[in-house]
Amino acid sequence: MKISVIGAGNVGSTTALFLAQKQLGDVVLVDVVEGLAQGKALDLMEAAPVLGYDCRITGTDSFEAIADSSMVIITAGLARKPGMTREDLLKKNAAIIKGIVDEIKRHAPKAFILMVTNPLDVMTYYALKTSGFERSRVFGQAGVLDGARFVSFIAEKTGVSVKEIQALVLGGHGDTMVPLPRLATVGGRPLKDAVDAATLDQLITRTRKAGAEIVSLLKTGSAYYSPAASAVAMAEAVIKDTKAVMPASVLLEGEYGLNDVCIGVPVKLGRQGVEEIVDMTLTEDEKKSLEASADIYKKALQELFPG
Ligand code: NAD
């Protein structure tokens, strides 16, 4: 099993580490910056005797090395720089994704594509369309992370182990995400019985702004441990064929009343990739929030695919 990680920055190199620790396969790390992926891969290999993983991690600036990968995790991209508009960033990252997808088509045409690069839902759609792959093979990581953040904040507030808390976040990876507190449980009881209404509102707001909270603390760069852990959880479900149900950004073709947009909904992940888009009854308000979230990404898509 070969898993390629494109982009050896913060998210990419941490993803490589977590993949190795779970021994999901050999890892190929690719970056356009000469020496960066090679250096990180060498460093990770030198940690292997201490951490006890037994797989090969190679670094390269050549896409030929991704040949016959089972999965390609895309973490390559630019962060917004001062003076750059969101549209500029969208177009620049889309150009990067197109170049990478062309390489995947050439060298690893049977691979699954797991998108991590932002804006996540738009880049997932773009990779799907430019690859021509079936929708079961192209999916994006967002909801696993957003849900994990919700759970960790609930755990902090209630003092209950994260292992005893369930919480789901659907929708796009941004301010319009759709946390579902109605379905959250703490040790089996509804979240609304475990915290008061004001606390619940705070938890939801903090979840929506969790990415920005980390950016403001770090000053440069954004979160990477939890995003990498979330991507690896999805990769593990596919590679080990676990049939885990988790949220992923996938192309909707009528499910949830939405069409021609990638957005976070619950899916079953296994050896065939997205094996099922799990149908879930939402309240009218939740449906409206999901639609509003999808509308934002449809507008962004119109910038990429005018007309
Ligand atoms: P980073 O700047 O540390 O790393 C990005 C890397 O991509 C750099 O090393 C750069 O050289 C490389 N790169 C650029 N173009 C490339 C190409 N064509 N081929 C190969 N490599 C290329 O950034 P990061 O913190 O690792 O974040 C990476 C991406 O992940 C960003 O788009 C970020 O917004 C996104 N992200 C997504 C989530 C999520 O939940 N989906 C969470 C965190 C970050």
Image: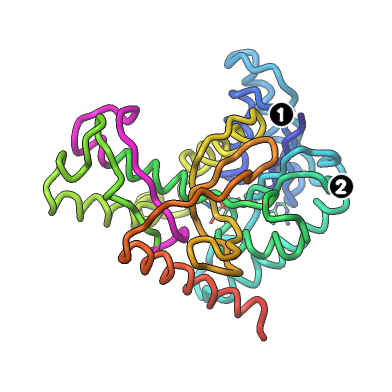
Q: Is residue 84 visible?
A: no
Q: Secondary structure at mark 2?
A: helix
Image-quadrant location for residue 64 = top right
Q: Amino acid at mark 1?
A: Leu
What is the C-alpha distance between the residues marked 2 and 1? 23 Å
Disc 2 and disc 1 in contact, CB within 8 angstroms: no
The residue range painted magenta reads 154-176
Q: Amino acid at mark 2?
A: His
Front residue of 51/130: it is 130
Quick check: 155 above or below 75? Answer: above
Residue 183, percent from left and from top = 30, 46
Q: Nearer the viewer, mark 2 or mark 1?
A: 2
For the C terminus, the quadrant is bottom right
Q: Which mark is residue 42?
A: 1
**Left or right for 226, reference 283:** right
Q: Quick check: is the Cβ at mark 2 less than 8 Å away from ligand 1?
A: no
Magenta span includes 88: no
Q: Which mark is residue 107?
A: 2
